[in-house]
C-alpha cells in the first residue's frame, strides 16, 4: 500500500510530465480534495497508507487534471476575496486581476446605493460588492442563461440573493433607465482571437470563449460599454472596466468622446495597464 506522500510524489511527477504548472501544489490540492483533507491535515498524514477505495477517489481527478481541465473546475469552487464561489464551465474562473478590480471599485464608489455588474459570469463581482456595500441594491446582467444560473447559485451560497437582481441582457439592452447607477463595473471579453488561441490549454480548452474574446482587436465590447454607460450612470457615478494591456489609449479616447468628465488607467499587480476608470 502506498502512503499519501508517495501518491503525492507520483502525481507530481505525472503532472510535471504533462506540462502542468506548479505540479506539486496541484497534486496536494487534488489529493486533499479527494480525501476531504485540507493541506495541513494532509501533511500530518503523509505516512498513512491509502486504501484502494481512497485511490479510486483520487484517480479520476488526476486523470481530469492531466487532460488540462482547470483545477478549479475539478474542485468545483474557488476563493474570491474570502467568498467560496462555485465554479464550472458555465463561466470564467475568477482571477486575481478581477479581485483588484473589485478593490478599486470599493475604494472609488463612496457608499453607492445602486450597482450594476455587466457580464456577471459566476457572479463574483456583484456578490463581492453586495457584501462590501450591504445597503446597496445590485443588478447583475449576463447574456448567458447558464452563467446567470450559476451566479444565482452563488448568490444563495453567499447569502446575498435578496439584494442582487439577475437579468439576462446583452450589455445594457434590457437594463431599465428608471434609476441610474452610482457604480458600474465590468470584466468583459477583451482578448483578440489570436490572444485566446495562445492561452494555456486550460483556458482555450475549457473556459467559455464567448467570455474571453471580442472583435475589433478585443475592444468591441469595451467600446459598447464605454459609449452607453453615461446614460445609465448617476451624476458623479463611476465606471470601472477590466481591459487588455494594450488598449488604454483607444479606450480613453472612446470614454472622452462618450462624454465622461474624467478618465484614467490603472495597473494590475504586475505593473501592466489593466483597468480604466471613468467618471460622469
Image (cartoon, rainbow, N blue to C red):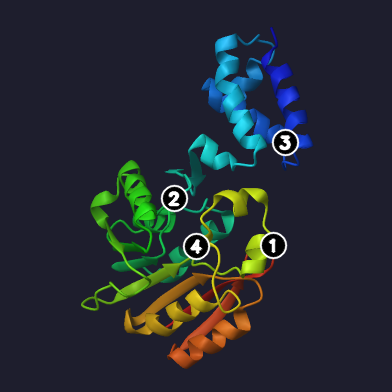
Q: Work out how far the residue at label 4 is from the one at label 2, CA to CA, in angstroms.
A: 11 Å
Tag of residue 210: 4
Question: Mark 2 packing: few (<14 Cα in 10 Å), some, or many (20+)?
Answer: many
Please identify, in this view, whether the residue under mark 1 or under mark 2 is nearer the observer.
2
Please identify, in this view, whether the residue under mark 3 or under mark 4 is nearer the observer.
4
Q: Position of residue 80 (x, y in %)?
A: 49, 48
Question: Mark 1 packing: few (<14 Cα in 10 Å), some, or many (20+)?
Answer: few
> How many numbered badges does the structure rendering display?
4
At 37% from the left and 48% from the top, the residue drawn is 150
Mark 3, residue position: 23
Tag 3's secondary structure? Answer: helix
Please identify, in this view, whether the residue under mark 2 or under mark 3 is nearer the observer.
2
Q: Is residue 37 visible?
A: no
Mark 1, residue position: 270
Q: Are marks 1 and 2 in contact (CB under 8 Å)?
A: no
Mark 2, residue position: 90
Question: Mark 4 packing: few (<14 Cα in 10 Å), some, or many (20+)?
Answer: few
Tag of residue 144: none
Sooner in the amino-acid sequence: mark 4 or mark 2: 2
At 40% from the left and 54% from the top, the residue drawn is 123
At 62% from the left and 84% from the top, the residue drawn is 249
Q: Position of residue 145 (x, y in %)?
A: 34, 56
Amino acid at each position: 500500500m502506498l502512503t499519501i506522500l508517495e501518491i503525492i510524489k507520483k502525481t507530481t511527477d505525472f503532472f510535471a510530465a504533462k506540462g502542468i504548472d506548479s505540479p506539486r501544489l496541484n497534486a496536494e490540492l487534488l489529493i486533499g480534495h479527494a480525501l476531504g483533507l485540507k493541506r495541513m491535515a494532509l501533511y500530518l498524514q503523509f505516512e498513512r497508507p491509502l486504501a484502494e477505495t481512497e485511490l479510486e477517489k483520487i484517480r479520476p481527478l488526476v486523470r481530469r487534471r492531466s487532460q488540462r481541465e482547470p483545477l478549479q473546475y475539478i474542485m468545483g469552487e474557488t476563493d474570491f476575496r474570502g467568498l467560496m464561489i462555485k465554479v464550472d464551465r458555465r463561466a470564467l474562473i475568477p482571477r486575481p486581476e478581477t479581485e483588484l478590480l473589485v478593490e478599486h471599485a470599493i475604494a472609488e464608489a463612496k457608499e453607492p446605493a445602486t450597482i450594476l455588474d455587466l457580464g456577471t459570469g459566476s457572479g463574483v463581482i456583484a456578490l463581492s460588492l453586495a457584501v462590501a456595500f450591504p445597503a446597496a441594491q445590485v443588478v447583475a446582467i449576463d447574456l448567458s442563461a447558464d452563467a446567470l444560473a450559476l451566479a444565482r447559485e452563488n448568490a444563495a451560497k453567499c447569502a446575498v440573493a435578496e439584494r442582487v437582481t439577475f437579468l439576462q441582457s446583452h450589455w445594457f439592452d434590457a437594463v431599465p433607465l428608471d434609476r441610474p447607477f452610482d457604480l458600474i463595473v465590468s470584466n468583459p471579453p477583451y482578448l483578440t482571437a489570436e490572444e485566446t488561441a495562445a492561452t494555456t490549454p486550460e483556458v482555450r480548452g475549457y473556459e467559455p470563449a464567448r467570455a474571453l474574446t471580442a472583435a475589433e482587436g478585443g475592444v468591441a465590447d469595451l467600446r459598447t460599454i464605454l459609449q452607453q454607460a453615461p446614460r445609465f450612470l448617476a451624476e458623479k457615478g463611476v465606471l470601472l472596466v477590466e481591459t487588455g494591456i494594450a488598449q488604454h489609449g483607444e479606450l480613453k479616447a472612446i470614454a472622452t468622446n462618450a462624454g465622461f468628465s474624467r478618465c484614467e488607467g490603472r495597473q494590475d499587480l504586475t505593473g501592466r495597464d489593466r483597468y480604466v476608470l471613468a467618471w460622469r
